Amino acid sequence: MQELIVLTGVVLFFVGVAAGEMLPRVVAFVASGSAFAYALVTLVRQNNVSELEAAAHEAGGSEGNRSDSDEDDVQVDNWDRDTDRSERRQAPESPVLQKSVREYEFRLSDFCDLEEGAFIGEEGSKSEFRYLIQKVLAVIKEVHFANTVAFSWINREKHQLVLEGYVSESTQFTSHRRRELGLDLVSQVALTGQPRILNNVNQAGQQESLGYYQNVEPVGSFAAVPVFYPRAASGSAEPVAVLWLDSLAPDMFGSETVVQLGQFAKVLSALIQSYTGKYDLLVDSEVLRSIGRLREQMSLEFNLQSIARSLAEETSRMVAWDHVAVVVFDEARKAWVVQVVKNRGNDAYVSVGQEIDPHGGIVGEVIQNGIARIIDAVAGLERPRFFAAERAESKGSLMVLPINSGGRCYGALVVESKDVRTYAEADLTAVQKLVDTASAGLEILALSDVVDNYILLDETTGVANRRYFMERLHEEVVRARDYDTGITMVMVSIDNADEQLNRYGKEGFDFILQNVGRLIKSFVRPYDLVGRFDFNRFAVMLIETSANEAYLWSEKVRKNIASNVINIDQRSFSVTVSVGVCSAVENRTDLELMENATQVLTKAMEAGGNLVRVY
């Protein structure tokens, strides 16, 4: 009876945790506390009575000549002397009772978690759900004297069981979070939706019947029940998870175990419903934050490289990945080219500037068809990802999304994981929203390029615009490769550009750009080229110049810009610049040259600005 009362109190406690309304939560907590208090008082009372009887028996043994009738007379006299039951409970002359009460010392840690941040971690509702699952499993383990209690999700799309949490006395419990649905008992519950009990586990066939221990364990009994999602809780509904436990003792579980586990399964179902709503909101808010960051970056640097880099960065925050690549069309080469690559482990993979096969590879097929694809296992495919001679060691899963807008394809986003069956439709839907934002930006950029085809100079600074600069850069890199001459690219960025823009406004910042552009042009030779790369950045192409010579040139330019005084609205000030230098060597392409110069420029800015860094 006491165990049932404790079980009821636990169920009421978690019902209160999952309740959304304040009134049901308070009622559930009060009822839960009452159940615990009643069980505790009953247990203490039974212990006190047992100790009093033992003391009386011991006293009777020391007086061996006392007869049974004498003992009865003493008990009757004591009863007559104190007829008030409440006074008997509080009698000060009961040393055994006082000793029993003093044995327990109150500790706050017995009733709540004192660890800071134990309830909610960095993952928000996800960590909250895991915390509550672990607490429920710990209670089940204590109530049923189990060896292991675990909770596993059922992924029917990928035919897998995914371990969410467990509590075990064994050190041999499996370290694999995912495993295929098979013929074991947990899988049978997942597939049939019916509870299972096994009270005599055959040790010889334990790996086939259970399968979640690394080595054979002396398990005697096993029980498992399905867990359903509340919205679809009907007789024909398929379970979404399995709750299971085992014991080292044989013949431990019966029909009452299924009934009790069913109550816990209802608590878990309520937690799942609450968590699902919170998780959906969390995913939506994370997607909105990523879209906001992507748009903010496009407002600062509205060019193809910036959009592709931001798309890859935000995608890596949304889904699991080991490799991320963005493929776009290069007008100069008239080919599909890898624009950005993120490689977590620096494994062999496609490189920046590599042309892909538009007809023979998976990425080319997605670009041609305009339909996204999820591939659970790359190892079984005969077609390459990008081109036939690619070097990619990963044999996991792949997700490819076309970058489409206005009926035109601008490229593809490629996300790859080393683990098989990593991506689901939910991942595709979330990433697709990022792709839609990036594709809209690429469409605007393409329309702007149509206009810029007839314009070679930037109207604000008078230097070459980005498109013309990139065309000349490609030509000069090819010529430097053919004639074995040197060429160096220098990226110059105005420090604290956002602060200058906020302080002096757009007209004032344009005046700053004009001064910086004029100073840079005064230091270049007639056959060198200066271009405006984006809103606060200039690119300089130094013909037949080594990296060391470019560094000395950059230092001279940096010092002259820092010493130049600018006057706006009767206010005098100066600005500083950060400089990144990269030289074209060893068949380096123009895209690699630009990417490397951007990387060292970023490092110079992160180091505090007003300095020169060389790749």
Image (tube, rainbow, N blue to C red):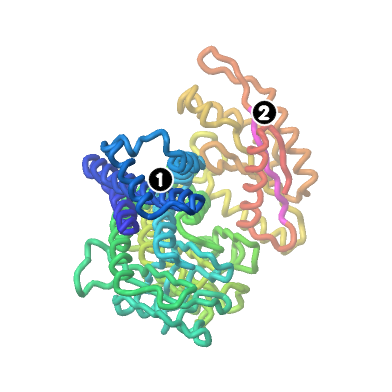
- Residue 150 coordinates in the image, percent (x, y): 44, 66
Disc assigned to residue 289: 1
Amino acid carrying mark 1 in the image? Arg
Q: Which residue: 37% across, 52% down?
A: 283
Amino acid carrying mark 2 in the image? Ile
- Residue 127 coordinates in the image, percent (x, y): 44, 51
Q: Which residue: 46% across, 25% down?
A: 505
Please state which of residues 329 and 254 is positioned toward the viewer in this rendering: 254
Answer left or right for 20 relative to 217: left
Q: Is residue 464 above or below residue 252?
A: above
- Magenta span contains residue 277: no
Q: CA distance from mark 1 to mark 2?
A: 37 Å
Graded by Cα atoms within 10 Å as few (under 14), some (14 to 19) or many (20 or more), the crowding at tag 1 reads few
Q: Earlier in the sequence, mark 1 or mark 2?
A: 1
Q: Which residue: 71% across, 33% down?
A: 557
Whether residue 120 is visible: no
Please state which of residues 341 and 318 is positioned toward the viewer in this rendering: 318
Nearer mark to the viewer, of 1 and 2: 1
- Which range of residues does the magenta coloring cover? 576-584
Task: For mark 1, give the secondary structure.
Answer: helix
Task: For mark 2, give the secondary structure.
Answer: helix
Query: Would you identify the image quadrant in which residue 432 lies?
Result: bottom left
Q: Is residue 5 above or below residue 356?
A: above
Q: Residue extending furthest front?
A: 65
| Disc 2: which residue | 561
Whether residue 402 is visible: yes
- Residue 260 coordinates in the image, percent (x, y): 31, 65
